Image (spheres, rainbow, N blue to C red):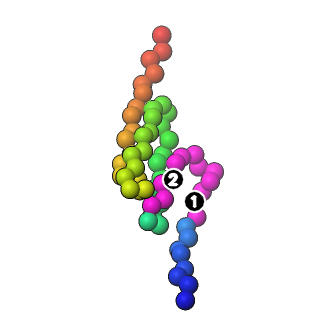
Amino acid sequence: MTKQIPTEKINTSVNGVYIVQDGIITPLKPKPFGQDTIFWQNGQVLDVERAERIRIKN
């Protein structure tokens, strides 16, 4: 007997990053400015660090 893997649909017209781990989708919404760093451990995402940059206009 073959095990069926459940599927989910994501809206590809929405900007962002999607992390899929153990069948669970975690969306990361975009920010105006900044940086995201993904930390891996044993082939799985452990943490996501989000840094924000604030632009100063003269």
Question: Can you give x and y, in whole percent of width and height, for residue 16 in the image?
Answer: 54, 46
The residue shown at (39%, 46%) is 39
Label at residue 2? none
Which residue is denoted by mark 2 in the rendering?
Answer: 18
Check the image and report above or below for 15 versus 35: below
Is label 1 in a helix, a strand or a loop? loop
Label at residue 10? 1
Question: Can you give x and y, in whole percent of width and height, for residue 18 in the image?
Answer: 51, 53
Is label 2 in a helix, a strand or a loop? strand
Please state which of residues 34 and 48 is positioned toward the viewer in this rendering: 48
Q: Residue furthest top?
A: 58
Q: Amino acid at mark 2?
A: Tyr
Q: Amino acid at mark 1?
A: Ile
Which portion, as a residue range, is magenta? 9-21
Q: Residue furthest bottom?
A: 1
CB of mark 2 within 8 Å of CB of mark 1?
yes
The residue shown at (42%, 45%) is 38
The residue shown at (55%, 67%) is 8
Label 2: how many Cα within 10 Å (few below 14, some 14–19, many 20+): few
The quarter of the image holding the N terminus is bottom right
Which sits earlier in the primary sequence, circle 2 or circle 1? 1
- Judge whether residue 11 is colored magenta: yes
Question: Can you give x and y, in whole percent of width and height, for residue 37 in the image?
Answer: 42, 40
Label 1: how many Cα within 10 Å (few below 14, some 14–19, many 20+): few
